[in-house]
Amino acid sequence: MSTQVHYRSVGVRGHEVFYREAGPPDAPALLLLHGFPTSSHMFRDLIPRLSHRYRVLAPDHLGFGRSSAPAADAFPYTFAELAAVTAEFTEAVGLDRFALYVQDYGAPIGLRLALAHPERVTAIVTQNGNAYEEGLGKEAWAPVFAYTAEPSEETAAPVHAIRSPEGIQWQYTHGVPDQSLLSPDAWEHDVALMAREGQGAIQFALITDYGSNIALYPDFHAYFRERQVPLLAVWGGHDEIFVPAGALAFQRDLPQAEIHLLPTGHFALETHAEQIAGLMDDFLVREVAQAQTTPPPAGVGPRPGAGFRGQAPRGGVSPCAGSRTRSAGPASP
């Protein structure tokens, strides 16, 4: 079956949302939500590996990639707003039920979507997409928290440096034992897009709004406990931005969550796309195929009052790059 990827765009609120799409239009849907500082480009190796069985869509958030990037004084760059735009995007492309893949910024965007529309989300795959305070790497997040605690030009400078070419490259290279596996094209692509006019203000607004996501962590946890949504964590075990404790924490609220710590860094797809695709396919076949074709139970719908404020075996932890029960190598050096 062809795995040809289509490159499209759709209008949402007068803005253009660019997205990649592949797979049969009537197949179970999988929505891929990228993180900072990248775009749907990060899924270039994953989409062809999954589109034989799923309708895969990967949008660029507003302000990222090839989507519109209105000025920061013309659009409210908050995670609540990006989640609302994402919800409208799913409606525009005809997604009513879908599994989520979330990474980095994609996690709070996707989880806000799940809070508002829990009946739409059939499963969650999180790849270094955090929802617990213990998952926040202390050193990586120190500049952001220092600025939000005491805003000044001095505390803002290290936050701006996160978007620098050196800061972007570090996000790709740290924690990767064999860096010859990394294509420099990945971070050079992001560096070029982050250098566009207006990006400084856009990205500063977003990263300093990250605290609004932490404030929602209790709501995310309640959603996990109430819905028991099937969850697979495929996590770069050497990530210093969202550390492995964040992956393990999901089992506190989702005891049957499947956790895999891979021996790589923050952008695990750059080195482990094939293994992640295999883990996902196994998980989604078990957890989503039936859910996608079975209507929600009567009376199941959005949580009252929910909105975008500012949604076979299971369970186990695998500290490896293999299956849930077999070790293929440790996650730590």
Image (tube, helix red, strand yellow):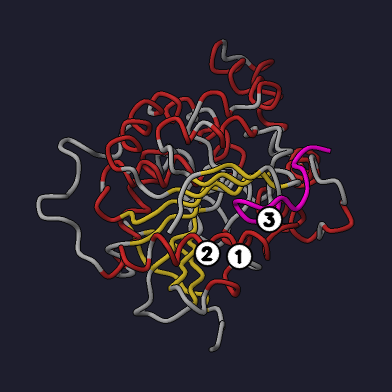
Write down the residue under mark 1.
Answer: 278
Locate residue 161: give its quadrant. Answer: top right
Q: Taking 283 as reference, is 215 left or right?
A: left
Q: Which residue is pictured at 30% across the width and 41% down the height?
A: 115
Viewer-side residue, 185 vs 159: 185
Q: Is residue 180 above or below residue 319?
A: below
Q: Which residue is pictured at 70% across the width and 34% down the height?
A: 162
Q: Which mark is residue 172?
A: none
Percent coordinates x, y for residue 29 in the rendering: 39, 68
Q: Is residue 316 above or below residue 53?
A: above
Q: Taking 116 as reference, is 322 left or right?
A: right
Q: Which residue is pictured at 62% across the width and 48% down the height?
A: 197
Percent coordinates x, y for residue 43 in the rendering: 60, 62
Percent coordinates x, y for residue 99 in the rendering: 40, 58
The mark nearer the N terminus, 1 or 3, is: 1
Range of magenta residues: 321-333
Q: Which residue is pictured at 57% across the width and 61% down the height?
A: 40
Kind of residue at badge 2? Asp
Q: Secondary structure at mark 2?
A: helix
Q: Is residue 11 magenta?
A: no
Marks 1 and 3, how far apart at CA: 9 Å
Write down the residue under mark 3.
Answer: 322
Label 2 environment density (alpha carbons within 10 Å; few <14, some 14–19, many ≥20): few
Locate residue 3: give its quadrant. Answer: bottom right
Marks 3 and 2, how far apart at CA: 12 Å
